[in-house]
Image (cartoon, helix red, strand yellow):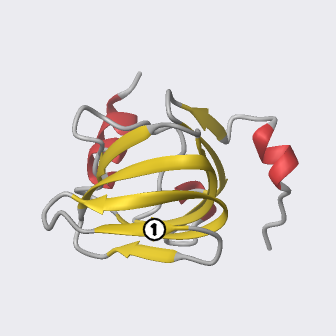
Amino acid sequence: MIVRTLQEARAGRRRVCAENWESVRLVLREDGMGFSFHITTIREGTRTPIWYKHHLEAVYCIDGEGEIEDLDTGLRHPIRPGTLYALDRHDRHVLHCRRTLQLACVFNPALRGDEVHDADGAYPPAEDQEANAAAAP
């Protein structure tokens, strides 16, 4: 059984920060669950392009207000508490944050934990991460 608090995880290595967001990663690949679970904060007034080419993600809005823009269709969907969106086709999208968003996110495959977005807004594929870890001295 795994038991963690958000406060404990935020104070340790499970907190990852980037320019537009902060992610506290409560369940990671090392936990052996087959997915990772994060509480992510998107900063107010930001625009974050994302394209998870190697991962599927489901996101549930706990608090805040924003919009998700599908870059392939041009459709925009409001995000507010109670909204869930699932990126089931590796959807290229932009998160527009009007009021700080607090999101619960699930990734498959699970993240290692230290990932940040690359130039495309993606995380590296899990197999690349494993190969890089194995090759490290």
Instruction: Please indicate whether residue 104 sits to the left or right of residue 126 in the image.
Output: right
Question: Where residue 69 appears, x then y in whole percent?
Answer: 30, 59
Where residue 117 sits in the image (x, y, percent)? Answer: 36, 38
Which quarter of the rendering shows the C terminus? top left
Residue nearer the viewer, 27 or 18: 18
Quarter of the image where one finds residue 56? bottom left
Residue nearest the viewer, comparing 44 with 17: 44
| Residue at 36 percent of width and 46 percent of height | 130
**The N terminus - image quarter:** bottom right
Which residue: 86% across, 47% down? 7
In the image, residue 66 above or below residue 7 = below
Residue identified by numbered label 1: 78
Task: Find numbered disc 1 in the image and state the secondary structure of the residue it sits on.
Answer: strand
Q: Residue at x 60, y 67 (%)?
A: 61
Q: Is 134 left or right of 31, judged from the image as shown?
A: left
Q: Is residue 114 visible?
A: yes
> Where's residue 90, x and y in %?
24, 65
